Image: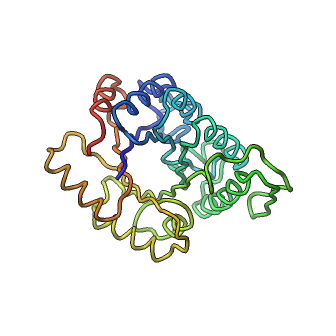
Amino acid sequence: MKFGVNLPNYGAVVSALSLAELAAEAEAAGWDGFFLWDHILASKNQGLQIVDPWVALAAMAMTTESIQLGTALTPVARRRPWKLARETVTLDHLSLGRLILGVGLGAPVKQEFEHFGEDGDRRARAEKLDEGLAILEGLWRGKPFAFKGKHYSIDKIKFQPPALQEPRIPIWVGGFWPNPAPFRRAARWDGALPLKHNRDLTPDEMGAVRDFILEHRTSKEPFDLVHIGTLSGKPTGVRKTLLAAHEAAGVTWWQEEFQKYKDDFKALKALIRQGPPR
């Protein structure tokens, strides 16, 4: 099992500079990955301090050498897929192949879509996500590519350079379990990041996600099952039991969520310095 830091892209102490520093600390402490949320407003509080995740991830790439970097999760429906293709390929090269793209429908709908005149309809967001992923994969190849869909249309074009990673930049798909649609989608890509409203998923629930993915997956390529949870502050015995149960359920990544420390840089840095809860 690998271990990643999971942090919002907003908070009193969150900036591109502070995140670059924290990423370097995480790498030195033995974390395997660092994953940022991708919000543009995120709250009714329009004064909330928010950093662009792609600029921040670029800064983080420049202060690290081996730790994997990514988003959890990027709402593809509120981005232009060709612009996202440019951003991800650029970051993939900048990081020497360390980028993981986490994707989802996006929330909160009212603040992040409708506030800016974007279509917040769930079906439309799902359609744009699927079309967007097809476009990303096509443009990442660096070969002539055209696309005609319900929401997006691209005349034949070739994006250079291609993505550094092969066969592509890994795509993890997030969604709320047990809603089946996100996990049928995830089975077509490289990983699943299941979520539950207001609580962590149990090992049994993660095992059910794994079984669902295996039932719907046709590729024999490796697949990641990602759990976002909180072990900080729990007794050592409880942590060991939880990790063992999740690993037995097929979890390949544990992302430790540090949302509650987004306004306390000193505490956040100290916790990251402790290293992953192996």
Q: Position of residue 150 (x, y in %)?
A: 75, 64
Q: How many marks?
A: 0
Question: In the picture provided, is 175 more to the left or to the right than 232?
Answer: right
Q: Is residue 248 above or below residue 71?
A: below
Q: Quadrant of residue 116?
A: top right
Question: In the picture provided, is 179 more to the left or to the right than 103?
Answer: left
Q: Which residue is located at x 44 percent, y 56 percent?
A: 193
Looking at this view, is 55 or 117 the one in front?
55
Which part of the image, by quadrant, shows the C terminus?
A: top left
Q: Which residue is located at x 16 percent, y 51 percent?
A: 238
Q: Tell me the colour scheme of the image.
A: rainbow
Q: Quadrant of residue 207?
A: bottom left
Looking at this view, is 143 or 83 the one in front?
143
Q: Is residue 95 above or below residue 84?
A: above
Q: Which residue is located at x 55 percent, y 74 percent?
A: 218
Q: Position of residue 121 (x, y in %)?
A: 60, 59
Q: Position of residue 122 (x, y in %)?
A: 57, 61
Looking at this view, is 261 or 98 the one in front?
98
Looking at this view, is 116 or 275 the one in front?
275
Q: Quadrant of residue 86?
A: top right
